[in-house]
Image (cartoon, helix red, strand yellow):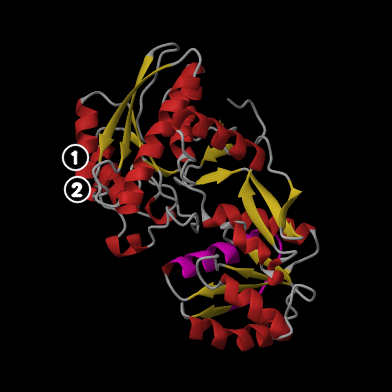
Amino acid sequence: MFAVSTLLRKPLARLAAILALIGLAACDVAPGAMTGGGGSVARGGVVAVALLVPHGTANAQEAQLARDLESAARLAVADLAGVEIDLRVYGTAGQPAQAQQAALNAAADGAQIIIGPLHAESANAVAVAMAQRNINVLAFSNNPTIAGGNLFVLGQTFRNTADRLAAFATSQGKSRILAVYSENVAGRLGLEAITQAVQAQGGTLAGSVSYDFSQDGVVNAVPVIRSTAETNAADAIFLTANSAGALPLFSQMLPEAGLGPDRVQYIGLARWDTPRQTLDLPGLQGSWFALPDPGRAAAFESRFRAANGNSPHPIAGLAYDGIAAVGALTKAGRGLTRGDLTQAAGFQGVSGVFRLRPDGTNERGLAVATITDKRVQILSPAPQGFGGAGF
């Protein structure tokens, strides 16, 4: 991946895949060379945590997200029993240079760990600045191309989603899977995740078809998808498309081309239950997709709304999860080193169990859902743990 000791990371061109706000991510990367810091934390001691959020941004939606992230973090601090967190909030304005300066200020103020920032490029800048100081960074991004060394991403990744769905598909006898992906950065990262997941779960990649990210691109891809599926005897189609992109058009045109859900299983790398109108699409009835534990996610949303008067942004819970992990380790008398953060049993977050991996990515316990009569139905519930003595 890269040698953290040289303070060099991947070229910023790779950071074009800043996916944190679209709920998707991608493939695994190799672990970084540095062991990371954090030091030991005495049981019952005060832990200094810096929260970096885009306060000061000119973007109204991002400003609201910043408020939601801070509110979720404060809710997590209030929930901790037997642990005292000194939470200090630093604004980044959504800019890498300001994020890095905020991190330097936080380190000077005694921060033992940094939670945030939001964007991949900002997270990269912060992690580089904190590497020499042995301070780990839990960023809100889900972009795996920046992960490793002292930088962890908290957002749900493409590979995590693809693994869960590929495992479920093969268990249901759907083992010849055709990948359909958009010809852009996110689509190519999605293809890589699907390919790796299908192979890891013992399935067969029955070809892949790309499409230009446009209406004409989708229209032109449909006959190619049908031909490839028939030639390679595909029994499932794994799409990277989401509701804001090509999904509505595919859900109409693939059945019209004779490749409907009665002939092949549709699988989605994205959440196909948002927005709510997506559930009404006839072509998606019976499709499969993954989502966090819906019961726990709903409970967090209810508590957040009661405390703040608004529903949380979809990724606001990541701030809660970061605080929860720090609190669990501190309560157990553990430190905040990479070894502590990546303990195998993981942590309990607002949307279910999760754990940080040595390569800087994460694994989240996900449920598999389908759409039946325009409603979400859980086919396989989210796991409640990863085994071992969890926190």
The image position of residue 191, as x and y in percent, is 54, 68
Residue 15 lies left or right of residue 275; in this view the side is left
Q: Please count the marks in the image.
A: 2
Q: Residues within 10 Å of mark 2 (few under 14, many from 20)?
A: some
Give the residue pinned by disc 2: 97
- Give the extent of the magenta segment: 186-208
Indicate the quadrant where residue 145 lies.
Answer: bottom left
Quadrant assignment for the C terminus: top right
Of 297 and 29, the residue lying toward us: 297
Residue 101: image tag: 1
Q: Residues within 10 Å of mark 1 (few under 14, many from 20)?
A: some
Q: Is residue 222 visible?
A: yes
State the predominant SS element of the stretch in magenta. Answer: helix
Q: Residue at x 50, y 58 (%)?
A: 27
Tell me the element at label 1: helix
Q: Residue at x 49, y 86 (%)?
A: 216
Of 288 and 206, the residue lying toward us: 288
Q: Mark 1 belongs to which amino acid?
A: Gln
The image position of residue 267, as x and y in percent, is 67, 65
Quadrant assignment for the N terminus: bottom left
How far, Cα to Cα, is label 1 from label 2?
6 Å
Vertical placement of 85 versus 153: above or below?
Answer: above
Q: Mark 2 belongs to which amino acid?
A: Ala
Q: Residue at x 60, y 57 (%)?
A: 276
Indicate the quadrant where residue 128 lies.
Answer: top left
Indicate the quadrant where residue 195 lies.
Answer: bottom right
Q: Is residue 306 magenta?
A: no
